[in-house]
Image (cartoon, grey):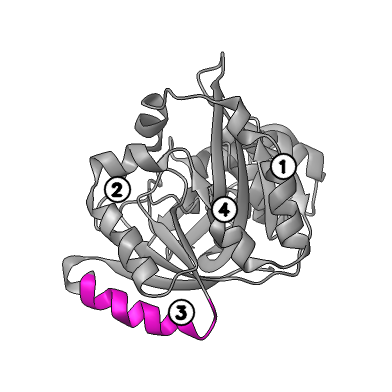
Amino acid sequence: MEFIAPAKINLYLDVLSKREDGYHEIETLFEKVSLFDRLVVEHAEQATSIICDDPAVPTGKESLMRRVIDAFNGQIGKTLCFKVVLEKNIPVSAGLGGGSSDAAALLKALNEITGSPLDKTSLLDISRQLGADIPFFLSDASFAYGRGRGDIIQEVRSELKMWHVIVDPPFKVSTKEVYTRFTHFDLTNNRGVDRMFSAFLRAQDTDGIAKNLHNDLQQITLRDFPVLEQVLFELKKAGAKGALLTGSGPCVFGIFGPKEAETAREALLKVFPAEESWKILIASTCFV
């Protein structure tokens, strides 16, 4: 059976404190977007195999995908074998949540093809053990707040459809390293942000969202990769209503109208050419 795994962007991300478990307490607003990986998952007779068309994606025994299968088997008390084929379209280590989305899609796939032995609560319990972003991708919502490590999900219902141009640079960023270097915690900056964004989503106010984009991690990543300052500038020059680093980066997105996105993409390709391994992608809010 084939399953899709959408990417995400963060419309805001506040880092609130350092937790005793080594992670950080955050609040963020996720949006699923129409950039998809595809998984084909089947039962296997003798051994589990994971195949991916991108060599940058780990597929061995310690990989996230294999850990999903092991955790699922452990929860149902069986040792089932599966064949997983992953078509990778979401850039790797880019702040778009591709690995977490793949893990969530695989977890749902395993449950579906085995007759749904686990309820949603059990699937969420597994997902929280495997990664902070995975619970969001288990939800059906296009928008959701992530609290705690990002794994406590509050879905937000909205019919708002936004269009984004996403710039994927030819380098990667370590999320762990960026968080390690974050030291400026200010709880007062976070008060009421969720209520404000909820109002924007209810009113389908794209301009309100665009004017209030915020990411506490952005300045750390920009210090390491100053070219991202130019990316932000060029997105706004091309007509973005707002532009922001997603997650720890390095991908940067801009919010556009549906008619302006393609024109902006063409303009950005002249500045950040594909021949130098830049990717300029167009995506919209995903309602899958």
The image shows residue 145 at horizontal and vertical percentages of 68, 45
Residue 260 lies in magenta, yes or no? yes
Residue at mark 1? 153
Which of discs 2 and 3 lies nearer the camera? The answer is 3
Residue 249 seen by the camera: yes
Residue 236 image position (x, y, % from top left): 39, 67
Disc sitting over residue 44 in the figure? none
Decide which of tag 1 and tag 3 comes sooner along the chain: 1
Q: Is residue 47 visible?
A: no
Amino acid carrying mark 2 in the image? Lys
Part of the protein shown in magenta: 257-271
Q: Please state, as top left, top right, bottom left or bottom right, where the N terminus lies in the image.
A: bottom right
What residue is shown at x 76% (from left), y 54% (from top)? 156
Residue 248 at x, y = what percent?
A: 42, 43
Q: Quadrant of residue 119?
A: top right
Q: Amino acid at mark 1?
A: Ile
Image point (31%, 51%), residue name: 56
Mark 4 highlights which residue?
212
| Label 3, label 4: how far apart the Cα atoms are | 20 Å
- Residue under circle 3? 261
Secondary structure beneath dot 2 equals: loop
Q: Amino acid at mark 3?
A: Ala
Q: What secondary structure is marked by label 4?
A: loop
Residue at mark 4 to residue at mark 2: CA–CA distance: 26 Å
